[in-house]
């Protein structure tokens, strides 16, 4: 697996997990700092993707994932598993957690802007 593919998997993992995180438990001002901390801790301690997801979930106080998160985790599990690439993804997430989360944050902001624009268009 290339570094670019591992980065994409890391970004997708962060976005998926943050979709199930709650602003009732994580203050919006702490949102991305918590994502970085959870990713770093999970990547440093996990031996496989299920453990990495579980550690991230605990750090983000996620009790149960929503359907969108579950779907993305399942897709990542197949993709990473088929390529035998967990170690590449884990190492990249541990070493470059700030960058992975920055890309995820930017992508999430772009998604929100697109969503807001489409809602405004429908309202007109």
Image (cartoon, rainbow, N blue to C red):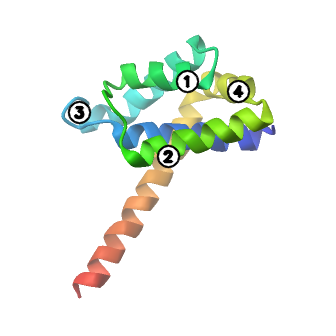
* Marks 4, 2: nearer the viewer: 2
Q: Secondary structure at mark 4?
A: helix
Q: Which quarter shows the C terminus?
A: bottom left
* Image mark for residue 50: 1
Q: CA distance from mark 2 to mark 3?
A: 25 Å
Q: Residue furthest bottom?
A: 124
Q: Which quarter shows the N terminus?
A: top right
Q: CA distance from mark 3 to mark 4?
A: 31 Å
Q: Earlier in the sequence, mark 4 or mark 2?
A: 2
Pinpoint residue 123: horizontal percent, then vertical percent: 22, 83
- Labelled pair 4, 2 in contact (Cβ < 8 Å): no
Relative to residue 47, is residue 50 drawn left or right?
A: left
Quarter of the image for residue 64 reads: top left
- Residue at x 68%, y 30% (from the top left corner): 89
Q: Nearer the viewer, residue 118 or 65?
A: 65
Vertical side of 99 occupied by 95: above or below: above
Q: Secondary structure at mark 3?
A: loop
- Residue at x 43%, y 60% (from the top left corner): 111
Q: Secondary structure at mark 2?
A: helix
Q: Earlier in the sequence, mark 4 or mark 1?
A: 1
- Labelled pair 4, 1 in contact (Cβ < 8 Å): no
- Residue at x 58%, y 36% (from the top left corner): 99
Q: Earlier in the sequence, mark 3 or mark 4?
A: 3
| Pointer 3 residue | 27
* Image mark for residue 71: 2
| Pointer 4 residue | 86
Q: Earlier in the sequence, mark 2 or mark 3?
A: 3
Label 1 neighbour load within 10 Å: few <14, some 14-19, many 20+: few
């Amino acid at each position: 697996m290339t570094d670019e593919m591992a980065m994409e998997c890391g970004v997708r993992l962060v976005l998926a997990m943050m979709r199930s995180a709650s602003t009732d438990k994580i203050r919006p001002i702490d949102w991305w700092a918590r994502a970085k901390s959870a990713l770093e801790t999970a990547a440093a301690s996990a031996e496989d993707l299920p453990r990495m997801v579980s550690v991230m979930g605990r750090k983000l106080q996620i009790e149960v994932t929503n359907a969108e998160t579950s779907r993305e985790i399942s897709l990542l599990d197949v993709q990473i598993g088929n390529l035998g690439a967990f170690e590449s993804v884990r190492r990249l997430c541990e070493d470059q957690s700030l960058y992975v989360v920055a890309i995820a944050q930017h992508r999430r902001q772009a998604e929100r802007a697109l969503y807001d624009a489409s809602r405004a268009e429908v309202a007109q």
